């Protein structure tokens, strides 16, 4: 009877070690998701690229229309801990990407953040004439297209953006911290499990 019991104990011990080793996978995933999009790396021809850009959870194109197809050239990406932009076809290698927000913030408002890009990219001011001059203005009035006195944007992207500003997605206060906090707490829980198992191994006879 002693041999089967020792065999079961050996198998149980190995399975436990495998289970502990596998917890490194979610640990690495949470760490990577926290740093994704928070840094830039060197790209070809002196360009700058967003680090781990393929791990964004939401992305869309906008701002500068393409001359060859019905799309836009600026790629905007939302990560759990950052909001970034990329312009792969930029004629200026210094303006191929940028980080609009990085790290926990008490406000998550992507549409307000991207309003800084026309200045960064030196776009024609007429493209954004319809936007509020106050970037912190939370509710832009929807312009009446039939009102000749209303200042218009020459860009269809900014015109559409200005129309949806009162209804845009935004988070303020504690909800804005939710994504990075969840990943951070998950890391703490996994590390705590490692600590418990380490203490159990030390106290085991």
Image (cartoon, grey):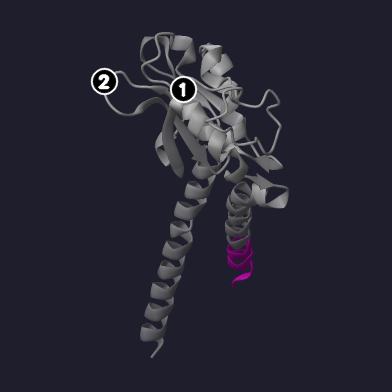
Position above or below: 136 against 194: above
Crowd band around label 1 with a 10 angstrom C-alpha radius: few (<14), some (14–19), many (20+): some
Q: Main secondary structure of the magenta part?
A: helix
Q: Closest to the observer: 63 or 32? A: 63
Residue bearing the label numbered 1? 155
Task: Locate residue 137: give its quadrant.
Answer: top right
In the rendered image, is residue 50 in sight? no
Q: Which residues are magenta?
A: 195-205
Residue bearing the label numbered 2? 68
In the rendered image, is residue 203 in sight? yes
Position above or below: 40 against 110: above
Q: Residue at x 55, y 42 (%)?
A: 34
Looking at the image, the residue that sits furthest to the left is 68
Report the Cα–Cα distance between label 1 and label 2.
Answer: 17 Å
Q: Left or right of 117: which side holds 185?
A: right
Looking at the rendered image, the quarter that the N terminus falls into is bottom left
Q: Earlier in the sequence, mark 1 or mark 2?
A: 2
Q: Left or right of 201: which side holds 69?
A: left
How far across and down, in percent of the image, does residue 110 sit?
A: 57, 36
Residue 198 falls inside the magenta stretch: yes
Looking at the image, the residue that sits furthest to the bottom is 1
Q: Residue at x 41, y 69 (%)?
A: 15
Q: Residue at x 30, y 28 (%)?
A: 70
Crowd band around label 2 with a 10 angstrom C-alpha radius: few (<14), some (14–19), many (20+): few
Task: Locate residue 141: give its quadrant.
Answer: top right
How far across and down, in percent of the image, does residue 124 sit?
A: 51, 11
How far across and down, in percent of the image, does residue 103 sit?
A: 64, 37
Q: Closest to the observer: 75 or 191? A: 75
Position above or below: 2 against 101: below
Q: Closest to the observer: 136 or 174? A: 136
């Amino acid at each position: 009877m002693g041999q089967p019991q020792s065999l079961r104990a050996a198998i149980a011990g190995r399975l436990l070690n495998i289970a502990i080793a596998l917890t490194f996978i979610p640990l690495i995933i949470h760490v990577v998701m926290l740093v994704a999009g928070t840094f830039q790396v060197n790209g070809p021809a002196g360009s700058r690229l967003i680090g781990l850009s393929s791990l964004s959870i939401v992305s869309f194109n906008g701002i500068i229309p393409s001359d060859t197809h019905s799309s836009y050239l600026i790629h905007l990406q939302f990560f759990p801990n950052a909001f970034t932009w990329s312009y792969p076809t930029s004629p200026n290698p210094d303006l191929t990407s940028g980080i609009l927000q990085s790290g926990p913030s008490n406000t998550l408002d992507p549409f307000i953040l991207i309003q800084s890009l026309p200045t960064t990219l030196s776009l024609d001011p007429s493209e954004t004439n319809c936007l509020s001059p106050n970037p912190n203005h939370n509710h832009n009035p929807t312009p009446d297209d039939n009102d000749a006195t209303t200042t218009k944007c020459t860009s269809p992207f900014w015109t559409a953006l200005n129309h949806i500003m009162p209804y845009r997605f935004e988070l303020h206060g504690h909800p804005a911290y939710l994504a990075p906090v969840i990943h951070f707490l998950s890391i703490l829980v996994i590390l705590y499990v490692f600590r418990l198992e380490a203490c159990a191994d030390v106290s085991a006879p």
